[in-house]
Amino acid sequence: MTVSPELDTARTASPELLRSVFRRHAAGVAVITAAGPGPVGFTATSLTSVAAEPPLLSFGIGTGASSWPVVSEAAHIGVHLLGEDQEELAATFARSGADRFGPATSWRTGPEGVPLLDGVVAWLVCRVVARIPAGDHRIVLAEPVAGDPTGPGRPLLYHQGGFNALRD
């Protein structure tokens, strides 16, 4: 019996292995927002469409994230799909300690009091349905209640540890 060359490089499962594999998985870039004593938000690449009937989506958030205390209690959240020209916005919402809703961020209050970012490819306001424990994260399950899919541009992607655009 021969071992295939691919198995020669196999590694034991670990957090680093999972991160290494998912660096190779291109993902759309979203910003999740919520209203609390002040608006909060974070960059997410874990956004997933879950079901069409009823419409449901999910995303993951670490319980140590600065946005988690507000997201853990929010009845509604905002989901924003970023465009290929919004790398800096994605980086701002990913950076620890950044002034995410400062003068450089154009936003407004939307339905259900949710902070909505301007100029995104698409946005949804969603009712939080569940927060499911998953290791050091929570999977948030949410149902869209309002949205707009008609923003300008093409999506921003995250791959190999950096932001990318679709190629023509």
Image: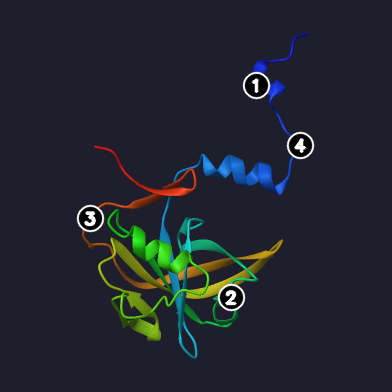
* Quarter location, residue 13: top right
**Residue 99 percent location from the top left of the image:** 43, 78
The amino acid sitting under disc 3 is Gly
Asked if residue 99 is positioned above or below residue 49 in the image, the reply reads below
The amino acid sitting under disc 4 is Thr
First of labels 1, 4 by sequence position: 1
Residue under pointer 4: 12
Work out how far the residue at label 1 is from the one at label 3, CA to CA, in angstroms.
39 Å
Mark 3, secondary structure of its residue: loop
Crowd rating for badge 4 (residues with CA inside 10 Å; few <14, some 14–19, many 20+): few
On the picture, is 45 further left or further right than 19? left
First of labels 2, 4 by sequence position: 4
Residue under pointer 2: 68
The amino acid sitting under disc 2 is Trp
* Quarter location, residue 110: bottom left
Asked if residue 72 is positioned above or below residue 10 in the image, the reply reads below
Crowd rating for badge 2 (residues with CA inside 10 Å; few <14, some 14–19, many 20+): some
The amino acid sitting under disc 1 is Glu
**Residue 113 percent location from the top left of the image:** 39, 86
Specify the quadrant that holds the N terminus: top right
On the picture, is 23 further left or further right than 85? right
Residue under pointer 1: 6
